[in-house]
Image: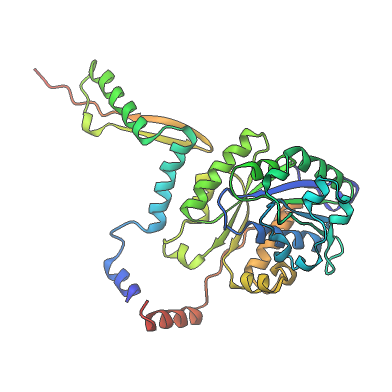
Amino acid sequence: MRIFGRLISGRDEPSSGDVAKERLRLVLAHDRTSISPALLDTLKDEIITVISRHVAIDTDDVRVTFSQNARETRLVADIPLLPQRRR
Amino acid sequence: MEGRGSDSRRRAARVITITSGKGGVGKTTLVANLSVALAMQGQRVVAIDADVGLRNLDMMLGLENRVVYDLVDVIEERCRLRQALVRDKRLSELFLLPAAQTRDKSAVQPADMIRVCEELREQHDFILVDSPAGIEQGFRYAIAPAEEVLIVTNPEVAAVRDADRVIGLVEAEEKGPARLIVNRVRPDLVRRGEMLDISDVVELLAIDLVGIVPEDEAILVTTNRGQPLAFSSDSSQAGRAFHNIAQRLLGQDVPFITLREPGVFERIFRFMRSEGDGS
């Protein structure tokens, strides 16, 4: 019944191949840079602290990630600014 | 690194190390079949089993009963290099330099491998070094003589991760850029999205692809017999894949095979069988 089950359940969850790719993308970035997930969290927290000192940001939505170009890795920070409230 | 054509007989051999990081990805099987495929193209080939202590390339090639001396005997000067080479009776230009079975990796230094390969270069076109798994001493001496490095991986998370690590080490040793062979691909799983696609693996590892080999029962059967699949190149996709890699190494522009899935009847049969046994 596996095939029918899959037809019915459709593509609600990503295939295991896609999950494997995403997991690898992340782990390879950590491996290549020697930046552990814990260190990445620290970097993110400190970036948030520094930026919030100057501008209002949506701290819950800050993303600090790696981007890959061939075998070159970049650290990318995506920091949403909060809309300026009218006084 | 540029492709050398059929005039390579006048030149010194290319030394190519085949490595993977992770064990069990089919490295030795690949070296055996690639050696046969290159020799069938008229190339003079030496396959070196660098996995000292875990000798297996002799079995893959069906030459295990003809081993007299080995790599460590050569290094420790118990015999001359010529005496240790096992000539394949099926292809007169194919030779095996076996690993020692009762020693360990500490018996070989990088300089030893460089010296052995240097001595082999004049008389041959290709020297293929079958690296041990891992990134320790065995890996170090296996890549020492390399001018080119081929990385073997499977479309599977652990193998890809280890391949990435090895690619980094090869680059650090300035032996790069390594090129990639994706082994044991199962088109049926890829189609269902349950296996990393070739393009995923190439994108993640970001090195050039030189071969795709599908999973094939025929490899097990031919290995059982000590008759590498590449001898019968037309009978299977995997056999053709080995020959395609050989041709690409010779500088020919060979398109990558589109992996054929099992036929409709085969699939129905498999489906019924798998449903039947309740798996």
In the figure, residue B59 lies in which quadrant?
Answer: bottom right
User: What residue is drawn where x is 51% and y is 65%?
Assistant: B187
Which quadrant, please, contains the N terminus of chain B? top right
Along the line of sight, the residue nearer the viewer: A76 or B255: A76
Measuring from the top left, give residue A30's x and y in whole percent. 43, 37
With respect to residue B47, does B161 lie above or below? above
User: What residue is drawn where x is 22% and y is 25%?
Assistant: A57
Q: Is residue B251 visible?
A: no
In the figure, residue B30 lies in which quadrant?
Answer: bottom right
Along the line of sight, the residue nearer the viewer: B191 or B24: B24
Q: Is residue A74 left or right of residue B83?
A: left
Which quadrant, please, contains the C terminus of chain B? bottom left
User: What residue is drawn where x is 24% and y is 34%?
Assistant: A61
Measuring from the top left, give residue B201's x and y in whole percent. 51, 50
Measuring from the top left, give residue B34's x and y in whole percent. 72, 59
With respect to residue B101, does A51 lie above or below? above
Q: Is residue B5 visible?
A: yes
User: What residue is drawn where x is 28% and y is 59%?
Assistant: A12
> Seen from this angle, which residue lies furthest top?
A54
Measuring from the top left, give residue B231's x and y in whole percent. 75, 69
In the figure, residue A53 lies in which quadrant?
Answer: top left
